[in-house]
Image (cartoon, helix red, strand yellow):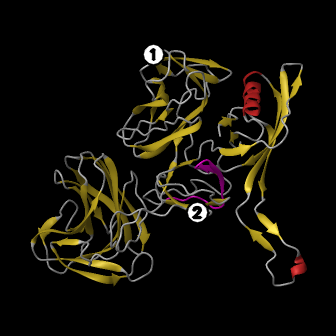
Amino acid sequence: MAEVMIPPWARPESPETIRMIDDATVAFSGAFGRGMTQRGIFADPRWGLRRRYRGLRSDEKSAILYALNESRGQFNIIRVTPHAPIRGSFATSELLTNNTFASGTTGWSTTNGVLSVSDRIARLTASTPGANVQITQSATLTQYAPYALRVMIYEGAGSAGLSIGPSLTGGNNSPNGYSTSRGLLTASAVNDGTGAQTQFGAVFSSTSGFTAGAYISIPYLSLARCALVDIGSNLLTRSDEFDNAAWTKSGVASVVADASTAPDGMTTADSLIENSSLSEHLVHQGFTVSSAAVDVAFCIAIKAGVRTFAVLDLFEGTGSTIARQFFNLGTGAVGTGLTQANWSNRRAFCASLGNGWNLCCIVARKTNAATSLRAYVGLASADGTAGYTGDGASDIRVWRGTVALSSVPTRLVQTTSAATTGSSPTGGAMYTKGWPASTSGLLLAGDWFEINGELKQLTAPVNSDAAGLAYMQFRPGLAGSPADNDPIIVLEPFGRFIYPGTREFENLFGIYGDCEMNFEEIYS
């Protein structure tokens, strides 16, 4: 099933009517008697949009007519975004210049192709078969923030079956949304570079199978900040049991199990007690990753005991090198750090969990082919001092060690005898990450967002902690379960709709056009 789009710049006449279609609830007759179930609810409602367009001409008329014609009645999906600005403070600025092609090709560069624009629809035509055909633009991104690059692609002559889509560049992270299918494609990642990055809005990633003159049409391109889904994976076992053999002890006299009240109110936090040797005083656990370069996040709850400083390490077993970070548990401040060979882009976060507890996180990129890694947590006598002569009695409290392949901090997740790949969210709430830190009201009730092609409206504010974590509550509930790191789109969120009514378009003097459209959301 193909997709078409009503571009956001094609503005309807106000007001736009937004309704909920509840075709999943069945009400039964009261004749069954009091005390009997009188309804059955099988799913959340769907969105319905009704909008009117008046006095359309030129590019707007062309965009609406294209959507009406190519929807083929109810067959193809129409991508539509509500015309409602967000009330929250989340930065939703468009980062691409002339992303609607209102100024023709201004701001865009092409490689091995020719770019032309008509009625705000760009046409990228291949001129050099056997090479990547690209449309590009430079944009400055905030370091260690997630972004989504989106492009709507319509099929053109000679492009059927080719792999084409956007490619987001952000330092080491360069994911793509290449596909042989056409529609709204997305590439998202956390930018770990600095300064301006070249964004590839559309790329013929296929370098064979087409001739000069093959083309695609692009009615929409966008680059903006987003957030990410956090499904709660953890590569470590025995996350709350530091006395277990899964955790190797070094320079630690003992681990006292269940010595303290944990952040969740249960008495399950352990105490790490240093020995009296001149050494580092740590516990560690190994885990396995792929040989590819990857970002790793190690997060754990730590509370000061006699010692008020702690240290976290990520260790790779091939070159025996570490990324290290110190934390001041008394003040909640991030201390000094160390980045050795085979690691890069180390960053750290510390968020209060209440009652003296801190969520301490280190994120770093493993750059070599090592597959065996370790996560270390230990005591420190001062900022930058992990090796010292212990007194055999001083301690810190630790709880719920969590390692995930993530470019931003993740929530803490309990494991026992096995690691967990997480649990994809269902219903009307989900855990998220990658937000600006320590901000209340990033989004407010009634604000829209998109996840996995589904259009949602918030029922509660989105407030982030110092690690950029936030819990989202919304309706309708999820029809499909998103994956870890799926982007949460806030700027111009689109839903998938069908146009169930009869196609009607009123021509006025052959120049202007009026129409009224009723859309119903559909999941696919």
Residue to which mark 1 is pinned: 128
Front one among 230 and 216: 216
Q: Is residue 61 magenta?
A: no
Q: Is residue 424 left or right of residue 272?
A: right
Task: Kindly state the secondary structure of the residue where label 2 is placed.
Answer: loop
Residue 104 image point, x, y percent:
60, 19
Front one among 251 and 303: 251
Q: Is residue 461 magenta?
A: yes
Residue 362 image point, x, y percent:
32, 57
Amino acid type at circle 1 is Thr
Q: Is residue 212 left or right of residue 191?
A: right
| Segment colored magenta | 449-464
In the picture, the disc for residue 9 is: none
Residue to which mark 2 is pinned: 426
Which residue is painted at 26% across and 79% down in the image? Answer: 243
Of badges 1 and 2, the one in the foreground is 1
Residue 370 image point, x, y percent:
23, 51
Task: Kindly state the secondary structure of the residue where label 1 is placed.
Answer: loop
